[in-house]
Amino acid sequence: MNETREPIISLRHVDKHFGALHVLKAINLDVYKGEVVVVIGPSGSGKSTLCRTINRLETIDSGEILFEGKPLPLEGKELAALRSHIGMVFQSFNLFAHMSILDNVTLGPVDVLHTPKKEAREEARRLLDRVGVLSQESKVPAQLSGGQQQRAAIARSLAMHPKVMLFDEPTSALDPEMIGEVLDVMTTLAADGMTMVVVTHEMNFARRVASRVIFMDSGSIVEEAAPDAFFTNPRTERARSFLQSIHGH
Amino acid sequence: MSISQLLAQYGEEYLAALLTTWKLTAICFLAAFVIGILITVMRVSPIRPLRIFAELYVQIFRNIPGASLLILLVYALPYLNILLSYFICVTIAASLIPAAFCSEYLMAGINTIAPGQIEAARSLGMTFSQTIRRVVIPQALRSSVLPLTNLLTATMLTTALASQVPMNPLDLAGLVSHINTHAVGGVMAFLISAALYCATAVVIGQIGTRIDQKVRILR
Amino acid sequence: MSSVRISARDMLYEEPGPKAKRRIRIVTGISLAALAALAAAVIHRFYITGQLDPRYWSFFARGTTWTFLGKGLLGTMEAALMAGVLAFAAGFFLMLGRISSIRLLRGLCIALIEFTRGVPTLLFIYFFFLVIPQFGIQMDAFWKISIPVAISACGVVAEVLRSGVNAVPKGQTEAALSLGMRGRSVFLKVVFPQAIRFVIPALIAELVIVVKDTTFAYVVNFPDLMQNAKVLISNYDALLSVYLVVAVIYIVINYLLNRLSDRIAAKQKKPAERRA
């Protein structure tokens, strides 16, 4: 499954506090090329924070995060350049409200990668078509449904040709009937070999698509396993009760 | 006096006064806008002394009455050996006060932007200045169109302070005071100036509403 | 993850890295030095022109100075309060006309509102100070300041009240009507009291404008804070210090009013958010 044994993302002994709250406790995690790592856990377990430290939207207190073997730059142009290689999809989509969907997708390539405008547009249209919202290209975000916005946001990230994609609860803000369309896009992406870190509550998605499941609780990685093993036979009591609580309703 | 008498005798003065009011308004609004942006930049900066200074500026000039400020500039500054022309004094007073409000509106405009969009820009690899130029400023400006047009009108009303000092040519408010202290101008003298102010305000309001409708951000 | 709402203002800058931290420290140092230099220059200016001389400031230590200024302030407050009450009454009726179903009345009220909002207060003051006496009408200085200030504010008050009325949910009217209440008493007993609560912060903010406008009372020779300041100035031959202190008094009063308005607004927002 792994093309190389060198992890693309590597967290070593990462700690983080929000004031008195210890949100990440000695996290160790390697993500290899082509892997889909799904992070699950109760809310407040630190899984979103973990995801956001990987492109340094959240800073860490101690430990080390490596991208392609090199520590994350701390600031400035180097940090911006690194982020351009890591796609990020947010819970609340975060499309730029004042721009059309097409402009949302071309902004990164034109401003950051200096792709010629025409080329960027062609590629953007291709990506919008791929996620199924090409017909909405000239609308502004508020005119789209949540599911459409999230798919456009995925296209915006893909336009940067990221080496890794981070998904921070991408379906949590969606109406139930729209969750499927977003998960379908993500499933296709995974099938195409994209390296992904996905924080989600969608257990079926985790089961179908994940190469590995990470279970977090109160700031620690409690369990790390292949999806089948995790869902049929969790090793820890905490994972077991979490899964029960989810199936409970 | 009847309107025809007034216009025959003071027609040119009214025109000059209207132009003076417009000129003062334009200069002061521009100055207020520039100062307002500078103050806003300080207020959002991570430099504490500048933040405190800018907040202090806003609180002082939001709350000082125009007359009080003008009197300080005209009558008190000479005691510090600072002599400014009446025109400059009026311009300063009618710029510093709107600048404080301008900054308040720009701050409100910035705060309408969802923080997530700034994070999204960062995640795309945009630098600080790219994020500011492409995401923050366009949105903040678009959502400040209506407050800023109201500010333009308010600036015009503030320039009536000019009537409190000897100016040549007079502004619209000053002319009313002038006509009525030298002759019996009656209600008409007042109404002509009032109508000119009002018409300007209505036109400004219309233009502002139209721009706002064009650039308004759907949320 | 955290439930604290972060505003865009605090998001503009990232958490600084080591280089950025150093830069912030340096710029902080430079700006501190610049502000200190500015303050020093101002004080120096006061010093070389002799304005720091105790004779310009010592009389502020006397109680009589403050009782005198206080009396002026009382005059200011009386005029401002009267103007506020008048503006509220006029604004109320303008608002009623503005939302009335009679087209002519509505048009008239829109015109009046636009007129009062588009004309500077000083022009109304000149009208009452210079034009009205031409008709042989004698008026107390108190009214010559409070009426024009009220006129200048009433249009804004009308619009503020209207926004409050619009903010009251339609269901309230429907519920009251279904109880058998009549249209007028529904408005006065159900809709308007709620509308007022919504707009109290905006009304207080408008009161700040009224207080500021009453500073023009010296134009009509009404004994307000400004007018009493003039007396102090001629008594002590101290113009700069007195006008500075007066400006500070105005700033503090208006600042406190604005704070009050913000506080009430914040308090009203909270339960509304909880409901959402």
Image (tube, rainbow, N blue to C red):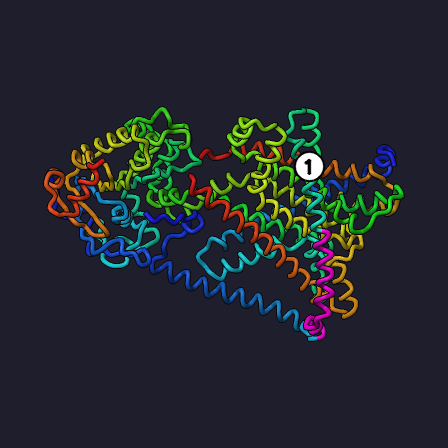
The quadrant where residue B11 appears: top right
Residue at 66 percent of width and 70 percent of height: C46
Give the quadrant of the N terminus of chain B. top right
* Other-residue count near label 1 (Cα within 10 Å), few / some / many at <14 / 14–19 / ≥20: some
Secondary structure mostly taken by the magenta-highlighted segment of the chain:
helix
Read off the residue under disc 1.
Answer: B200
Q: Nearer the viewer, residue B108 or C152?
A: C152
In the rendered picture of this protein, how many numbered marks are placed on residues? Answer: 1
Q: Position of residue C234 (x, y in %)?
A: 79, 67
Q: Is residue C67 inside the magenta stretch?
A: yes
Of all chains, the one bearing label 1 is: B
Residue A119 shows in the view: no
Q: Nearer the viewer, residue C235 or C8?
A: C235
B171 to the left or right of A54: right
Q: Which quarter of the image is occupied by the C terminus of chain B? A: top left
In-front residue for pair A160/A120 = A160
Q: Position of residue C238 (x, y in %)?
A: 74, 68
Residue A35 visible (yes or no) = yes
Residue type (three-letter) at the residue carrying disc 1? Thr
At x 85% / y 39%, what residue is drawn? Answer: B186
Instruction: Report the side of C271 relative to C166 (left or right).
Output: left
Where residue A196 sits: x, y (%)?
22, 40
Left or right: C37 as drawn, with respect to A230 = right
Range of the magenta residues? C55-79
Residue B189: say if magenta: no
- Above or below, C245 against A237 in this view is below
Residue A31 location (% of width, % of height)? 18, 46
